[in-house]
Image (tube, coloured by chain):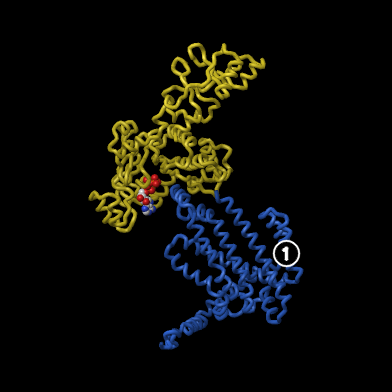
Chain colours: A yellow, B blue
Amino acid sequence: MKNNTILEVKNLSKLFGKNKKAALEMAKGGSNKVEIEKKLGVTVAVNDVSFKVERGKFFVLIGLSGSGKSTVVRCLNLLQKPTSGDILFEGRSILDFNKKELLDYRRTKVAMVFQSFGLMSHRNVLENVAYGLEIRGIKKDERESEARELINMVGLEGWEEKSISQLSGGMRQRVGIARALANDPDILLMDEPFSALDPLVRQDMQFELLSLQKKLNKTIVFITHDINEAFKLGDRVAIMNEGKIIQIDTPENMAANPANEYVESFISSADKGQIYSVKHIMQTPLCMLQPKDGANRALKLMRDNGVSSAYVVGEKLELIGILTLEDAIKVKKGEMSLNNAIIREILTTKEDTLISDLLSVAATAKYPIAVIDNENHLKGIVSKAAVISSLV
Amino acid sequence: MPDWFIRFPSEINVDITGPIDRAIDYMVRQWDPFFDGITKILRSFLNGIEYIVDRIPWWLLIVLVFIVTWRVSKKIGKSILYSLLLFLIGAMGLWPMMNITLTLIIASVIISILIGFPAGIIASSSERFNSILRPLLDTMQTMPSFVYLIPSVMLLGLGKVPAVIATTVYAIPPLIRLTSHGIRQVDKEVVEAATAFGSTKWQSLIKVKIPQAMPTIMTGVNQTIMMAISMVVTCSMIGVTGLGQEVIHSINKLEAGRGFAAGISIVIIAIIIDRLTQGIVKKGESRIEE
Ligand SMILES: Nc1ncnc2c1ncn2[C@@H]1O[C@H](COP(=O)(O)OP(=O)(O)OP(=O)(O)O)[C@@H](O)[C@H]1O
Ligand SMILES: [Mg+2]
């Protein structure tokens, strides 16, 4: 098999503080982070970490705050200089790079996306995206047309001349991603890029990132402290704790065979959206009608139950559609027929759909979502409120 | 109780006046050609500025103030007020005096920027330079301003040139401080982004740090200008003509009205320049900040 490793990290350690040598010895001797910090005042941010990243794969680093994720990733483009260990890019140590090679490496091989975006507020969207090209000395019209293309790709066409302050969080991170893609790098380093975004935007961004990655065939090293995000995005996931990697595996293997309790507790902290499915939160519809019931009865039912719409079902509870209060009134006045008043294009879902998958649908739903079985029988309904409240 | 317990004993006597005097004496004698050179350069610099300032028609300056005020504040009342105030200076017969004073201020501020801006940039990146600079700036700022006049006069003689030097020394600290501060407080992630995308040190300074720090730097420029203006009267003690001299003359002759006219003119200049530069700072800020 062809060697397809693009990035290899070998026994990487990074310490912060004065007496690094002694601390490194202590760490090799098996002392843990807290002991070393107490004794020598040295922070062992990363402790003897090794891993390989395959070309075109999505590699996720996950761990609690302070476990050293950012430090590892910041070593990958030498924003931090490793205390010991080695980092190989396509088989060559990046620590051996001279000044020019390092600049080239940063300009064309690795690009970074930041948690709070790291955008330059004195530049507009276009100028931000073109930044990486600009510092390489690429001509203005050339870099701008390149930047425009990327802005389109992340769905921000029309916003080129806007200033960063006019953008929402999600849009800002799109700019961040477009900027990172501008130099067509091999590797994207993403340090909690979606942590600052609210859940729905985050879902969209995750989805778009995945499709971008598939389309452009980039290698991604992605940090998160959200196990759901890690499992959703990662081809392989590495869990870190106190500067060490505890386990590296595919999401499936990790979920099936967690290496220890730490990993297990991490996995069990997976959000409820990934565990609970529709059947946990669906309700019995309060108000069901049959076409033969007629407008008067429909109105009475809705009034008695205090609802503004009712599900219309057939003899065997097979779902037909929804009748709203307004339409029922129109039917009663003779302005339209009951048959025409029934809305037949409605959102449906199944009992075992994961709630996390229902989120984006629920956000746009006008009426409660109907839960049906394979024979199209109405089993229950899920309201938007129920979806959202199940997550908190 | 012995007397020395309460009163400071006169036997203890550290003399720093002597050495300082001698040092300056020495410099006057030994470095004379050097100071001569500086004097020549500064004098032609001042003459150049004076030449330009003198040739700006009075009405053009008033119109300019009107336009700039409008662009900065978008308030017609303010624009009219500032133009009228400037007109008032001319109406009181002080326009030529104002030109002399403006020349001095402009020259000092330009020199302050030429020196202070790079110094601030170096101070922002070098802890060592910063730790030397900080006490120096504190001293420069707290020392009574006319103390600078004495060595300036001894080294450079009377007149505008020593006045420009003294004014610069007095006015430069806020610019250095705020340039350094402004650059240091640029969002760390933004600077990091610049590095991560492969900027050289120079590129991240020019393309990211300085533009991001611009509002703070402009605040420094504003403060430097204000301090330069406040030196005007002090400088007239060494024979600089202009509005400051009017004030000194009227003190000597106890002419309150004349003193007020000149004083008010200085205040008017200060207010107009202050509001305009601050307006520019605000505009920059609203662009940079989120
Ligand atoms: N520049 C620095 N100087 C000193 N200590 C540092 C520095 N950067 C990181 N550390 C320390 O190194 C350890 C690991 O930090 P790191 O930022 O890599 O963690 P992280 O996993 O990214 O955490 P988070 O989820 O909070 O971002 C922490 O204890 C932190 O305090
Ligand atoms: Mg981090």
Which quadrant of the figure has residue A230? Answer: top left
Image-based side of A346 in relation to B250, left or right: left
Q: Nearer the viewer, residue B48 or A62?
A: A62
Secondary structure found at label 1: helix
Q: Position of residue B152 (x, y in %)?
A: 56, 77
Q: Position of residue A319 (x, y in %)?
A: 50, 16
Q: Residue at x 46, y 19 (%)?
A: A379
- Crowd tier of the residue under label 1, counting other residues whose Cα lies within 10 Å: few below 14, some 14–19, many 20 or above: some
Q: Position of residue A120 (x, y in %)?
A: 52, 48
Q: Residue at x 65, y 59 (%)?
A: B276
Q: Position of residue B231 (x, y in %)?
A: 61, 72
Residue A306 seen anywhere in this rendered image of the structure: yes
To which residue does mark 1 refer? B85
Q: Is residue B248 above or below residue A44?
A: below
Residue B203 seen anywhere in this rendered image of the structure: no
Q: Nearer the viewer, residue B10 or A284?
A: A284
Q: Residue at x 50, y 60 (%)?
A: B181
Image-based side of A221 in relation to B229, left or right: left
Q: Residue at x 59, y 16 (%)?
A: A297
Furthest-front residue in view? A304
Furthest-right residue in view? B91
Q: Nearer the viewer, residue B191 or B81?
A: B81
Q: Quadrant of the N terminus of chain B?
A: bottom left
Which quadrant of the figure has residue B55? Answer: bottom right
What's under tag 1, amino acid-wise?
Leu
